[in-house]
Amino acid sequence: MTLRELSALVSTILVIVGTVWYLYLALNEIKVKPVLASWIVLSGTMTLSFATYWTTPGHSLVNNACNAISIVSVGSILVAALWLNSKHGKGVSFSGFQKGCLYVSGVIVMIWAVLVWGFKGTGVIPNILTQVLMLIGYFVTAEKLWHAKSNSESLFLWWCILFAGFAALYTGIVSHDYLATIYAGRTIFGTAILIWLMYRAERRSHLTT
């Protein structure tokens, strides 16, 4: 096994471990409270990210392993959130920002379809647009954490995602795959901000108790 393949495997394992722990906490209603609308949006953008990447030159499952396993991760959490909402008789409501993300995702899908199937081009531009959209999407959680008086997120999951991002970054760099590198860089940047805000929220909760 090459270092490239090993780093891809490490990123995959980290995401799986973090997801299993998050599901345990969520299903047992311990601390974390998954917001259904947020996971619907994330599931859509994560899938779009991988789909557009797969229509780019030189695409590789190994290079984009972190994105591939993240679809499974987000999908499983989405199912858990659906089950919890059904259990408590809750519906789903999207914020204006979340609706905007869904609309933009739809526009990117149309751009992707026109470029790839209409002009026989590639999914490079749609993939980059999706990374920008996903980065913007972090600000929904960031805004919530900025005003939060306690942390309702799983730090373990997000630390796993951060380290998975670094492993995926190595994979992308040694593979000379700039789209996989952009994906990993976006993951690291956004996740690092969220982790800092989570610790900030936890400090605030200690100060108020």
Image (spheres, rainbow, N blue to C red):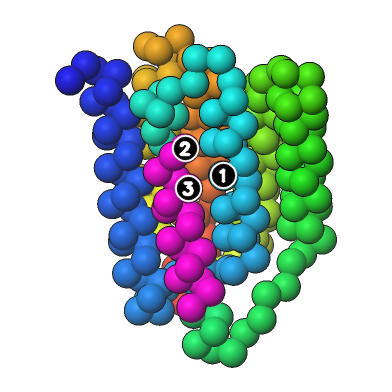
Residue 145 in which image quadrant: bottom right
Report how far apart the C-alphas of labels 3 and 2 lie in the structure.
7 Å
Cα distance between the residues tagged 1 and 2: 7 Å
| Residue 181, position as x, y percentages in the image | 50, 21
- How many other residues sit within 10 Å of disc 2, few (<14), some (14-19) or many (≥20)? many
Q: Which mark is residue 32?
A: none
Q: In terms of sequence position, does the residue under pointer 1 or pointer 2 come before the other?
A: 1
Q: Amino acid at mark 2?
A: Asn
In the picture shown, does residue 20 fall above or below 128?
below
Residue that appears at 56% across and 44% down? 46
Taking depth in this image into account, of 199 and 84 the one nearest to the observer is: 84
Q: Which residue is more in the foreground, 35 or 151?
A: 35
Number of marks in picture: 3
Q: Is residue 99 left or right of residue 71?
A: right
Query: Where is residue 191 shown, x and y percent of the image?
Result: 50, 42
SS category of the residue bearing label 3: helix
Which SS does the magenta portion mostly show? helix
Left or right position of 93 against 200: right
Mark 1 vs 2: CB contact within 8 A: yes
Within the magenta stretch, is there residue 9?
no
Q: Identify residue type, mark 1.
A: Met
Task: Identify the residue position indicated by label 2 in the image.
Answer: 67
For residue 173, above or below residue 166:
above
Q: Which residue is mark 1?
A: 46
- Dot label at residue 71: 3
Q: Position of residue 146 (x, y in %)?
A: 63, 56
How packed is label 1: few (under 14 Cα within 10 Å), some, or many (20 or more)? many
Residue furthest to the left: 1
Location of the N terminus (image quadrant): top left
Dot 1 lies on which element? helix
